[in-house]
Structure formats: structure tokens, C-alpha cells
Image: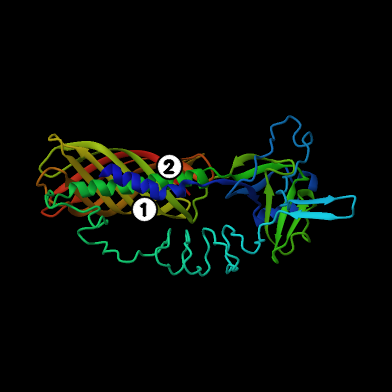
Amino acid sequence: MRAVVSLLTLGFFAPVAAGCISNEYTIPRDELRRLVITPPEMRGQQVHVVQDLGSRRTDAIATDGPRWPEADPWPQPEPPPEETRDTDVELQLDGRIDVQIDGRGYRPNGVAQSAWRGTPTGGGGTPAGNWRGSPPSGGSVTGWRGTPPGGGAGWHGVPPGSGSSGSSGGSGLGNLGGVSGGGSGGNGGDAMIVLAVVLAAIAVVAAIALVSSEGVRFDGVAQMSPWQPVHLKQRDGNELVIALGDLSPVALDGVVEAKVMDDEGYGIRTLDHLRLDRTWAPTFKLDGGSMTFARAGGGFHSGIVANMQFGVYVRPWLGLMLTAGVGGAGDEYGATLTRHVFGFEAQSLPLALGPLQLGGYGDVGYAAIASTASGSGPAEWGTAIGGGILGELQISSRMALTVRAGANEAFFVGSDTSPAATITGGIAIY
């Protein structure tokens, strides 16, 4: 059951992991205003650019030559090939001209054509598959999607005379995923395991998608030739292409966006990422590691835990996050104990040592604990509170490695408590 849930979840969410960085880089508006007052011959030394997300039309131009960019030519992307019609004209000496055109829309009278969508002429031809007009009387149509004639092959509607899909004699899906009457009856441990697997699978796929897009795209200082073409998108939808050294306040009038491409001109050499700016940055975090916890009336158990968080940093040093921590461990009888915590967390990173930021966190919420042992009953729920230390190491302008260590206490009905200690490491995407 757990394997099936994991595969289904990954299958449904895998398409979001297809993030891709583009060949286009946007020059912010403030940077454009700075460039126009910089001497033209110096404009390409340091330019702030932000790489776009999307498709890449071709490979970037290499910028690792010793005399770049002067030694490189100015290649341009080839335009897409134009569609041509296959037309043969044969001239003969007797004055006759034979013209033969290989078209796609011509249908001679009485000759069937694939994917014909008009009303067929009465020349005796039978319309081909995928025809969507009114069928001729008595004609057999393959793939027809209109009102079915009697016994039409390939018809996609509800077959006449079919029984109810829920009847006991059919082969319907009424029993798919059903639960037999011989279940364990009220055991919440399996349900909590399924919940943990689903949440972890979704978080992993989301992390892969964000790392391959937001995490790796360039946001920083780049170097380019003063003659690198800049694409200026006008307010009226038109586009003006002008060299970087020719930018002027007049040229920027009415411009809503400016872009450069790393696959045209002399190319773009990326230098340094900007410092990670967390101000009002939507944030996703995923980390995993070990957890040791105790259950009322039992000893300590050690296992694994994963923390999934989403929120926003309202200040460069203060973040507000929704958090889910799922974990579990095996007991001495071979059963699995699960212990999950869901709630709200405040994070603070006031100390900065270069790319390293240090601080702490505190959280409040609800905790659930359950066991897969026979007759253990449903999961127990209670309140939880915790805190610890937090550190992040910037590796790009939008991604950091994280490490955290802390403890929390869960309070269940009847004054039973469950303390836990965790240490984890992972990633943060801003």
C-alpha cells in the first residue's frame, strides 16, 4: 500500500519537476537607468541580469576564450525554415505547360480523403476515419463522433443496451480500492504511515522542481560586450534591438522590459551571484534527519524525521512558516511508531558571517502519535511546542543549505507527554 501511494503521488506530481532555465536574461529597470549614464565602452564590465525560466532555443555561446569577446564572431540564431510547397512545373517544346501541385486541401469528387471535415460530395466515395460531418445513410464510419448510426465501428459514445457500471455482473470499478470486512478495526498506525509517505513524496518532487528552476537560475553580475544586442520590448508590443553601448534615455522611453540572450551576439559571461535577499521572499524548505522520542509508558525510540515548510520572510532575518514534521521509529516488538507534528514556526537569522547566517526557531501546533501494533487503536492527538537553533549557508542568490537541531514536547489527553529531539539538514529555496 505504501509503495503504491508513493508511485501514484510521484506520477501525478512529476510533471512539475520539468523546470528549465532559459537563454534569456532580464536587465532590471534600475540597472538600465544606471547603464545609460555609464560610458559606453565600460557598460559591459558589470551588468545585473536575472535569468528567465522557460525553454532554451540553443546552446550558449562560449565565453572562455583568452581574447573574448573580441576574438569571437557575432553568430546569430538561425531563423526557422519556411514551409515550401512542392510544385513541379514542366515546360515542353510543343507549347503545353503541365503544372502538378501536391496540396493538402484538395479533394476530387468521389475520392475519399483522410480527416475530411466537410459534407462529402455524392460521388460514391466513403469518408475516411476521423470524419466529423453527418454520416451518409448506411455508411460504416471509423472514429466517428456524431450521433451513432446502427452498429457504427469505433464509436466513442455510451454503447446502447449496456448495463449499469455498478451492477454485480459487470466488470466495473466499484470494488477498486475497497476495504474488506476483515480489517484491523481502528488501527491508526497504517493511516499515519500513508500520510507521511504522501507528504514526503509531494515535498521531494516539489523540491526537485524548485532546485532545477529557481535554485539554479542566475541572478547576479554578468560581463558582456558593449556591442551585445539588447532587446527592448515597447509598451505597444513592438520590440527594438539595440547595442548595449548605444542605450540612451531616448531609447528607453516607453520600454517595459529589456533582455539579452546568451546564444547571440558575443555571449554573456556570468560572474557572481548576488547576496541572497530574503525580504518578502516566498520560501520552501525541506530537510531530513534523525529523531529520538519517547511515548508515555514506554522507553525512547530512535528513527527518521522529515520537515516540510512553506511561508514567507517578512524581513531579511525573520520568517513565518507553516510546518509539517513527519517521522517514526520501530519498537521492540516489531511494530512501527509514528510521531508527526503540524503547526506554525517563526524563524530568525540575525547573525551573518559572509554566506553563513545563524539563528533559531520556535514552533507551536499539534502532534499525533500512533502505532501499527494490533489493537493499538486510532492515533492520539495533542498540542506541541518546541524550538532550537538554525543555520543556513548560501549557495546561490535563491538557494541555501540548512541545518537545524532542536527539541519539542507533545501533550496528550490524560497529561501524557512525549518529548522528542531532532537534528536535520536540507535545502531552502527563496
Residue assigned mark 1: 346
The answer to whether residue 368 is left or right of residue 273 is left
Q: Nearer the viewer, residue 417 or 389?
A: 417
The answer to whether residue 290 is left or right of residue 414 is right
Looking at the image, what colour scheme do you see?
Answer: rainbow
The answer to which of marks 2 and 1 sits earlier in the sequence is 1
Mark 2 burial class by Cα count in 10 Å: few <14, some 14-19, many 20+: many
- Could one spot residue 39 in this view of the protein? no
Q: Quadrant of the N terminus?
A: top left
Choose mark 2 or mark 1, whichever is in front.
Answer: 2
**Residue positioned 39% across, 63% down in the render:** 151
Residue type, numbered disc 1: Ala
Q: Nearer the viewer, residue 15 or 353?
A: 15
Q: CA distance from mark 2 to mark 1?
A: 17 Å
Give residue 164's position: percent from left, percent from top.
Answer: 26, 64
Mark 1 burial class by Cα count in 10 Å: few <14, some 14-19, many 20+: some
Residue assigned mark 2: 427
Q: Secondary structure at mark 2?
A: strand
Q: Is 118 placed above or below 249 here?
A: below
**Residue positioned 23% across, 41% down in the render:** 328
